Image (spheres, rainbow, N blue to C red):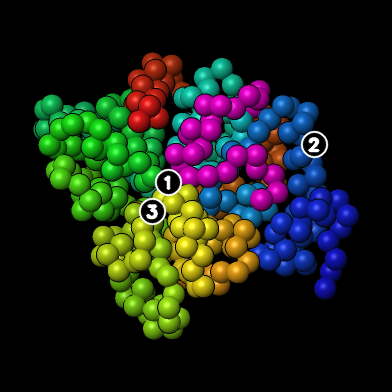
Amino acid sequence: MTAAPPSAAYLYERVRRVIPPIEWPAFSDDIDAILALKRERNAVILAHNYQTPEIFHCVADIVGDSLALARRAMEVDADVIVLAGVHFMAETAKLLNPQKTVLIPDLGAGCSLADSITAEDIRLLRQRYPGVPIVTYVNTSAEVKAESDICCTSGNAKAVVESLGVARVIMLPDEYLAQNIAAQTDVEIIAWQGHCEVHERFTPADIRQLREDHPGVSVLAHPECPPEVVAEADFSGSTAAMSDYVGREKPARVVLMTECSMSDNVAVAHPEVDFIRPCDLCPHMKRITLANIRAALEQNRHLVTIDPQVADRARRAVERMLAI
Ligand code: 13P
Ligand code: SF4
């Protein structure tokens, strides 16, 4: 076995269960450089739960689900925010920190949900359903948020929908999230036909096979999965809720029906839990690497900018959500 080099070696202890020692030398230079650059530039790194363990556990300052990243972005006391996640997350951080430099290491880190709807689509929906409030998942562009009444995440969607005190809402763009929330509330939900390219691929047959192959396994599914998948799971919740479930219930064996890095990141904190790992990779999340985080800090790229007129209206929808 190749020993971890001394630089950043203490960090290797955190991830040794999920990163083989032979891979560590490929990471440790960039980790050292990023830690130094963060000090030099007074920068913080916000990382989503789907980031790879060497990012999530070794260079990130704040980690979490989309809701936690938005909440914590408001509290950041730094000059520079690097968002290790996808573009809509970086835009949300910028909306909440208009005076700060917000960087995304790869501008191509998009999202199939964000790509499924435009601001023009929302304006047409308003004409078709006059007076019906529009609840927009944070997985959307700032332009789409600007046309919306309020945002939500998978962690607070039910609370947001019910906070409006109306009988009917439009919830977009994730059709499956809308259907999964509709199953938990009396509020009628009009959905859009956007899907997450990662979660839409899971099927009930996958769950039945997993239960057959791994008797007693607890199955946790993200609410971006189709409703028939959520119906067969033992629990459904945001990435943070799934992580909390593992910590609270300590299942002997668990499978997380979600993006691949999630299991690695949660497994680090729970050596006693056996993680079964069928998973799907999010190609957008995986565009973020240690190398491009380092380049982002060295070269001040890629700056996240939002048209101020769009930003003011989009910020209102995000802040209204955060007030709940
Ligand atoms: P959450 O972390 O809010 O559950 O979102 C999952 C996701 O797919 C983000 O892109
Ligand atoms: Fe978008 Fe799905 Fe990737 Fe999240 S996992 S960024 S929802 S495509």
Q: Earlier in the sequence, mark 1 or mark 3?
A: 1
Q: Along the horizontal axis of the image, is 22 left or right of 164?
A: right
Rendered image quadrant of residue 3: bottom right
**Residue at point 84% right, 69% down?**
2
Residue 258 visible somewhere in the drawing: yes
Local packing at callout 1 (Cα closer than 10 Å; few below 14, some 14-19, many 20+) is: many
Kind of residue at disc 2: Ala
Q: Please report the residue visible at 76 percent of the width from the left and 59 percent of the height from the top.
A: 13
Identify which amino acid the numbered label 3 is placed on: Gly
Q: Considering the numbered disc 3 on the image, is that residue within a helix, a strand or a loop?
A: loop
Q: Position of residue 162 (x, y in %)?
A: 23, 37
The residue range painted magenta reads: 57-80
Q: Is mark 1 within 8 Å of ligand 2?
A: yes
Q: Quadrant of the N terminus?
A: bottom right
Q: Residue at x 51, y 37 (%)?
A: 69
Mark 2, residues whose alpha carbon is within 10 Å: few (<14), some, or many (≥20)?
A: few
Cα separation between marks 1 and 3: 19 Å
Residue 24 relative to residue 63: left or right? right
Query: Measured from the top left, where is residue 125 in percent x and y?
Result: 17, 33
Q: In which image quadrant can residue 156 be found?
A: top left
> Quick check: is 68 in the magenta stretch?
yes
Q: Distance between the residues labelled 3 and 2?
A: 36 Å
Instruction: Point out which mark residue 148 bears.
Output: none
Q: Read off the residue under disc 3.
A: 237
Q: Residue 111 carries which label?
A: 1
The numbered mark, 3 or 2, whose residue comes first in the sequence reads 2
Secondary element type, mark 1 = loop
Q: Which kind of residue does numbered mark 1 sit on?
A: Cys
Q: Pick the residue in front: 124 or 6.
A: 6
- Cβ–Cβ under 8 Å for marks 1 and 2: no
